[in-house]
Amino acid sequence: MARILKDPGFVHLHVHSSYSLLEGALKVGDIVKAAAADRQPALALTDTNNLFGALEFSEKASGSGLQPIAGLQVTVAFETPDPMARVAPGQAGCANVVVLAQDETGYANLLRLASRVYFDGALGDAPRVSAAGLADCAGGLIALTGGSTGPLDGALRQGRTELAAARLAQLKAAFGEDNLYVEIMRHGLADERAVERELLRLADTNGLSIVATNEPFFAKTGDYDAHDALLAIADGRLVSDERRRKLTPRHGFTTRAQMADLFADLPDALNATVEIAMRCAYRVRTRKPILPNFARVAAEAGASDPAEAGVEVVRSEPEELRAQAIAGLDLRLAQHGTAPGMTEQVYRDRLAFELDVIVGMKFPGYFLIVSDFIKWAKEHDIPVGPGRGSGAGSLVAWSLLITDLDPLRFGLLFERFLNPERVSMPDFDIDFCVDGRERVIQYVQERYGHEQVAQIITFGTLQARGVLRDVGRVLEMPYGQVDKLTKLVPQNPANPVTLTQAIEGEPKLQAAMEEEPIVARLMEIAKKLEGLHRHASTHAAGVVIGDRPLEQLVPLYRDPKTGMRVTQSNMKSVTPIPVPGSR
């Protein structure tokens, strides 16, 4: 049930989750719980250069009665960098801007921005978008000037007021004065106090509203030390190194009352947060799977003249599926015959039944697509497994060469795979030889369009043993001591043991914590960081195919090693066609 507050007072509009990799120490669920505990009506998630957690946040927030606002902290190159230099956030010309989606158009532009930061530059460049690229995607978005890592604060700290004014003019030209807010932060940093007066002057001079933000990276003040260790891990530095990036205990998740006290002298800045939340009326939602039209793809691929790419499709997908399945069954029966005690009519009746179910559930395109790339792999001598799981119970799959198991011969049931009473996307477990996997992916990209095909992202996390080693290193503990402690944590990949469980079950760990304060500190910090996202990589067993450029449906990420297009949503958020599985 939605919360109706007479005076919300303040809404968080600049929040980082653990999807701000090795930067945020707040899990999405913990953010929602913290907001709900404070009876906050709305909240914006603005992870750095990604929308990894957008759908998860939207689902969990709305389920808790919290209005989710889709947002992004995007790194913008305001001045043209040296083309020979690798520009990273914080270097010359780059600064962070926060953008929030007001409506469907704004969210579409958010998707474009989240993708462009990875694809506009060369492979290996730090994620960023040009100021012109930001302006190109400004429709339907509200922009905040980014606070302490933004283009205004950075220039003002250097005493370059003219540069700050020029950057603000760029943003104002892109978003207009109604959709641009000058961000004011108060985390207790001297740098923030030094520029606040000039920020207020710039806002007033340009007819812009100010907005108060807190930029939480962790839950509460007591989590500061753990988050500080996380930043040290991210930078490859030691906690004792005073030259590295450091935040303050005030970068925790503040309550409405705390923000009201902190900005009591700037009530307009607080009111602006509520105003912005009321203007953002779009929520990220799930949708039914969208498949490319196989029949049209096949017709376009068969056109002898590129000008004929729009040729009329001769057969619909249901017709194509029936034709291929009947022909395939004829071939299978000619090669293998019927199972003992079965007649050809039994096979044909079963095939007709399955086809009716598949067509009725609107999945003929799925079967045709999977059959298409499996046939291609077999024709090009790429080993393909015989099929596993419930998909082996489909006679249509056997007829289309998707599987190599005759389900009638082995008494396998189709209903376990596809059942009208339990509507879900069919899922074939397919094994490809690892040596041919990339060739299959390339075929799918060429067949359905590079812009319509992507692999799936996966996230590595700080797990029990790994986080102990990471924290021990930044705390400057002896390697041998950390290694000994780490080996006391049971290693079970199938059912990972948490640090809490390991400590409860291992007296030697308990004794070490009681005897040495540094070990107790190691365990305390490691437990708080355990489970946070550490890095993004490419899933080896899933490919997404859409009926349009995927950037219109899901934000895209570029694998920094391979350059492969990857969805920013993981397996739980996208329904994959499992093309390149290598088991």
Image: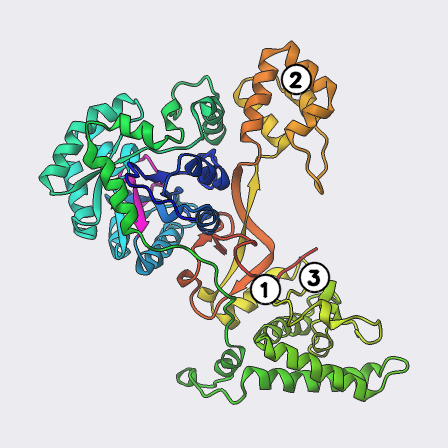
Type of the residue with mark 2: Gln
**Residue beneath the point at 41% across and 32% down:** 217
Q: Is residue 356 above or below residue 95?
A: below
Label 3, label 1: how far apart the Cα atoms are? 13 Å
Q: Position of residue 131 (x, y in %)?
A: 25, 49
Q: Residue furthest right?
A: 340
User: Horizontal placement of 121 versus 296: left or right?
Assistant: left
Type of the residue with mark 3: Asp
User: Horizontal placement of 138 versus 337: left or right?
Assistant: left
Q: Position of residue 299 (x, y in %)?
A: 50, 83
Mark 1 or mark 2: name the one nearer the start of the chain.
2
**Residue beneath the point at 60% across and 79% down:** 359
Q: Quadrant of residue 148?
A: top left
Q: Position of residue 8 (x, y in %)?
A: 30, 39
**Is disc 2 placed on a helix, strand or loop?**
helix
Mark 3 highlights which residue? Answer: 431
Label 3, label 2: how far apart the Cα atoms are? 43 Å
Mark 3 or mark 1: name the one nearer the start of the chain.
3
Mark 1 highlights which residue? Answer: 577
